[in-house]
Amino acid sequence: MGKYEDVFHASSEDPESFWLAAAQGIDWEVAPRRALDASGAPFYRWFPDGRLNVCFNALDRHVEAGRGDQPALIYDSPVTGTRRTYSYTRLRDEVATFAGGLARLGVGQGDRVVIYMPMVPEAAIAMLACARIGAVHSVVFGGFAPHELALRIDDAAPKVVVSASCGIEGKRVIAYKPLLDRAIELAVHKPQKNVILQRPQERAELGTDDLDWADLVAAAPPADCVPVPANAPLYILYTSGTTGKPKGVVRDSGGYAVALHWSMGAVYDVGPGETMFTGSDVGWVVGHSYIVYAPLLVGATTVLYEGKPVGTPDAGQFWRVAAEYRVKSMFTAPTAFRAIRKEDPKGLLTANYDLSALRYLFLAGERLDPETYHWASTLLDIPVIDHWWQTETGWPIVANPMGIEAAPVKPGSPTRPLPGWDVRVVDPSGDPAPPGVDGAIVVKLPLPPGALPTLWNDDDRYVASYLSAFDGYYLTGDSGHIDGDGYVFVMGRTDDVINVAGHRLSTGSMEEVLAAHPDVAECAVIGVADALKGQIPRGFVVLKAGTSREASEIEAELVQLVRDRIGAVASLKSVAVVAALPKTRSGKILRKTMRGIADGHDEPIPSTVDNASVIDALRPVLRSPDSTP
Ligand code: COA
Ligand code: AMP
């Protein structure tokens, strides 16, 4: 039995002992005596009798252990020409001071703080400051528009919002404050105060409810860590659901800290004093877990990079960062590597940098296409590790665990389930699918520590969305198969979630925006394959009878509407006015058939189709976005 089998076996035979042993990697105010409380199933609780503070574990304990001078966080921003290193002592002090500032504003244990910030260290400082005083943060990705921010403000009901005067997108400076002001105007819930980090690239005008970050910290005494129950929420992170209302994924404190700490050694093979660079954004789960919390929990150094893989200013920036900070594990989305490859197909820019410290490249967020896998592994000549996870899970479900044992890679598969994850593939009636046969990917309950315990203020939606399809199993929303060697192949979503440049978006929410246009009678948005971004959305609308305006005018309005309501990150650039949409006899739009045709497949026409001729009429426009229907 290889080491992977040993560890996996130990975790499934005796999860109680396995996770209690893993919990020893964390400093507890009150150490847990039990790992799992299943008495409230399907609402499971990890480490029910433990108390801890996650910020203490991420910062203070390392200072106390003598790591105070070691870099904790390196801010590298090619878009502003800034580099700044925070030692563990400095980061702890700045976090404690900001936490003191939040406390002065009345933020206490359990209160929510929405953080809407670009990739600046103050975003991580604000997150850790919340954790320090037991407040619950909810970071909203900067690429979302005011309407999306307003939805999250209304759901989380924050006492305070923390934001910045601007973000920098490539060469553009994007003023954040007007977006925040608009969101607060749209929201029913009104935060008491907004703390604004003034950036020199564009300062914001502050109103009566706004406070300058610098003024707040100048007057604030440092705050101590407040120990909280292991089950206290650390954060809420909203993710796309099937409707326009995002799902507020709740993350507990103790289970998450244990799982992340364990994963750093087992999966990423990064320990104290080593450096990890995760090229993502703090607005996504990857950023929460592997830019901020996990590297700090183990006393490693994390790189927070404000820039893009290409164009800021070139496709060599990831190599520069890896070389300059002696990065051991790099983690990003496959799309970033496709972008680099497009600019520098032969990877010539790597020659300018010393990549001798780089041991692994981890990729996640979307399917790793074998071509990108081969390109990256040939170029870097290090293990390229595809791994599969979700906002809901907080850490990987399936991975090739570099700190346990490197298994042979099968391109197209993220390898085998990690300890804690009992992954199955089932057919529509819930029966196990034979090896190699596609079905719904589910995970047997209970989920391991770190995974979501519920949705914010919505246990019913948690059960309805994830637990009701197959009794006793968590529905991942992904489909795929497991082969005879136990390798999992994740092929795509079974719902209307799409992955655009590693960003998770809902076509359903884009349809809601299109349907709200006064000239639109009905619409469909589908995710189609894209060589760079993995998938991109395309919209199709049927106009109301009697609409006489130019189709092209309406199409442009619809593209703009989605940009205004959801944000530029939606990347909806093509909307086509069509005569009709293909439907089943019961009136369901055949989105899967449309998607298959758009992707160039020989898509079978379902027998339930009502209007087959519509499909023939639509075929040219589906195949080529530029042709007119
Ligand atoms: N604030 C404001 N606008 C933002 C934004 C932010 N934080 N992030 C993205 N946008 C905007 C972009 O500027 C772009 O606007 P445009 O349509 O005017 O050009 C739009 O949203 C779409 O962004 P994106 O899909 O990211 O495309 P891009 O062309 O700017 O960059 C990649 C493409 C592949 C380089 C980039 O997406 C990337 O690096 N992705 C991989 C890493 C990653 O973050 N993955 C997430 C999970 S691991
Ligand atoms: P997010 O919640 O943004 O992390 O997106 C999660 C979704 O991204 C998953 O449900 C998958 O559809 C997709 N995904 C993430 N990682 C992978 C991977 N390694 N392979 C295939 N799909 C992935």
Image: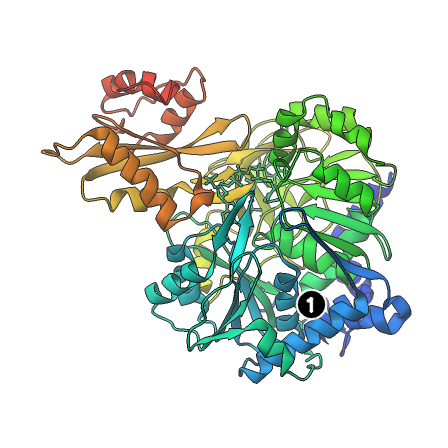
Which residue type does callout 1 highlight?
A: Gly
- Answer whether residue 401 is visible to the viewer in this image: no
Residue at point 29%, 20% (across, down): 618
Pointer 1 local density, CA inside 10 Å: few below 14, some 14–19, many at least 20: many
Question: Quarter holding the N terminus?
Answer: top right
Which residue is more in the foreground, 136 or 602? 136
Image coords of residue 545 (percent x, y): 11, 33
Residue that extends furthest to the right in the rendered view of this protein: 66
Q: What residue lies at 23% left-to-right and 44% top-to-bottom?
A: 517
Q: How is the rendered protein coloured?
A: rainbow
Q: Position of residue 320 (x, y in %)?
A: 76, 40
Q: Is residue 609 left or right of residue 252?
A: left
Q: How many marks?
A: 1
Q: Residue at x 53, y 33 (%)?
A: 533
Q: Nearer the viewer, residue 548 or 588?
A: 548
* Front residue of this view, candidates 8 and 576: 576
Q: Secondary structure at mark 1?
A: helix
User: Can residue 395 be seen at all in this image of the molecule?
Assistant: yes
Q: Position of residue 173 (x, y in %)?
A: 51, 50
Q: Is mark 1 within 8 Å of ligand 2?
A: no
Taking the image in four quarters, ligand 2 sits in the one at: top right
The image quarter containing residue 461 is bottom left
Left or right relative to 460: residue 488: right
State the image coordinates of residue 141 (x, y, percent, origin top left): 52, 54
Up the image or down, 7 lies above or below 548; here it is: below
